Structure formats: structure tokens, C-alpha cells
Image: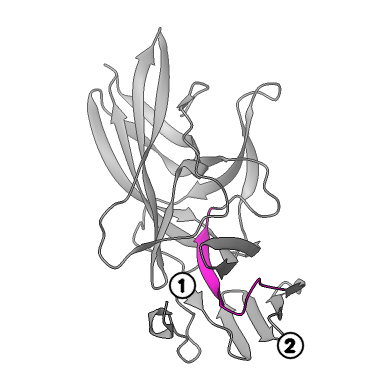
Amino acid sequence: MSTSEFSSLAGNDYPEFGRYMIKEELVMNLPSQKITCRQLNDNSFSYKRESFGEEIVRKIIHPKTADFQIGLMPILPIHTPTYKTDFFFIRFNEQIYISQNSSMEVIASFPIETGIFLVEEEHSGLIDGFSCDPVGTHFALYGNPEEGKLCKYARIELESPTIQQLFMHAQMKIKIVNESDEGVFVGKLVFPVTDHDLHFHKTNVMMDGLDAIIKNRIGVRVIDMIQNPITGIEGWKKAIRDTQKTDYKFSMERGFD
């Protein structure tokens, strides 16, 4: 890959997602974070992340060869403060009412994190994962304490779906289909976020869509959660993953209002 294919830093603007080379020193200023990579002797380089919250992360990285790049990528919001679950709990700021045998689509601003990768030939390894959002996401339990599912949690605003905070949110299309014969209220969705890929174009990010299908199953109303992949959008690239993509078969069976 030639250097002309790499994104470039411009002035004091935020860098674009993509791959970079270290030429003596690489500095990337992100919201609430500053990344500095400095070439050392041989193939090694130093990595430092300074947070406005005064956290400082320092590492020495030794690639296999001198032919490597640094990848700045959006990553799924499951890494901070520690990776404990593949599931995400969305709470809408307002409940949505969906009439019987109908469907609707919403565009939500979904939280993301940022990853710094060491890219070597066909292999990529995560050096550091962090959130640029000072509020960040939290953990929540879906279901009862004995059998509930631990999830990452965020409250989602629906009034301004086109507002996307750089390095903090991705746009995500959610389609809710009500196949039951009664109208229902939906106030939360729980789904396996590791089923989804992130896609980027410059500093913009989209996540694979989510289809939530409401149906009656043996007298119980459930929601089947199905990942809807993004394909064929010119100029967009799939972000590097550090976790294996999953294919869960998951239904919400413990309420969704």
C-alpha cells in the first residue's frame, strides 16, 4: 500500500479514520485525548495517550518489521472500562408506539469507542481502546439478578438523529416491525452488538443496522433481534475489528417497554 492511500492530518483538525505511518513522530488530537507515537531505534516506537482527565497511558511497541502502519479506527463500545459482555442495552429517551402489523424506521446516534491498531501485513492488533466521550457508557442488567444478561448501556436520543459527535457516535438505522395484532410500546432494545460491523468515511461512522421484529410466541410477546449489514456504499470502508464477529440468535423475552 502506498503512502498516497493513507489519510492525512490537516492543521488542528481531527484526523480522519484510517491508516498512518510514523515518520519520526505522529501526533493525533482527538476529543479529550491526545495520541503521540514516536519512532525509537530499530523498529520500535513509543506510544502515549494523554487524557484531559489526566490519565496517561504509555507503551513501547515492537512490530515484527519496519513495514507497519498505525490504524485509527472506530470500535464497538464494549472495551471501557473493561470488556465484559457482547450485548448492548439501548434505552430510548421516549417510548415509541407501534400499531399492529406495521413497521417504522429510526436513525439513532449510537455510542462508539476509538481504537489504535498496529497493522502488519494481514494482521492487526489493538494497542489501545478508549472513549472520547467524558460521560461514556455504563453497565446494566437486562432481566432479573439471578438470570439476567449483563450489557453495556446508553440512553439514546431520537429527536436529533442527524447530530453526530465526532469520535463519540455512529449513525445506526433501527427498523422495528410489529407482527402482532396489537399496538405495543417499545422503550428499550437489547441486542448482541458484536454481531455488527462499523464503517467509516473520513470522520463519519455508521454501524450495521438492526431489525427488531415483535411477535407472539406461545402466548408471550418477544422481539427477535437481527443484524442488518451495510453493503455497497461508495467511499465507505469497514473498520478493523479486534473482537471476533458473532452470530447470536437472540430474542428479548423479558419486556421491552
Numbered tag placed on residue 41 in the rendering: 2
Give the quadrant of residue 101. Answer: top left
- Where is residue 170 drawn, in percent x and y? 43, 58
Q: Nearer the viewer, residue 83 or 246?
A: 246
Q: Is residue 112 visible?
A: yes
Q: Nearer the viewer, residue 169 or 17?
A: 17
Q: Amino acid at mark 1?
A: Gly
Q: 72 above or below 185?
A: below
Q: Residue furthest front?
A: 65
Seen at 51% across and 43% down, the residue is: 194
- Where is residue 191 drawn, in percent x and y? 49, 36
Q: Amino acid at mark 2?
A: Asn
Q: Is residue 130 visible?
A: no
Q: Which residues are magenta?
A: 62-76
Q: 206 above or below 224?
A: below
Seen at 58% across and 90% down, the residue is: 23
Q: How is the image coloured?
A: one colour
Q: Nearer the viewer, residue 16 or 109?
A: 16
In the rendered image, residue 72 lying in the magenta stretch gets the answer yes
Q: Secondary structure at mark 2?
A: loop
Q: Residue furthest top?
A: 218
Q: Answer with left or right where residue 9 lies relative to residue 38.
A: left
- Where is residue 4 drawn, in percent x and y? 38, 85
Q: Residue furthest left?
A: 102
Q: Residues within 10 Å of mark 2 (few under 14, many from 20)?
A: few
Seen at 34% across and 61% down, the residue is: 162
In the rendered image, residue 23 lying in the magenta stretch gets the answer no
Q: Nearer the viewer, residue 239 or 181?
A: 239
- Where is residue 122 drawn, in percent x and y? 51, 62
Residue under pointer 1:
18
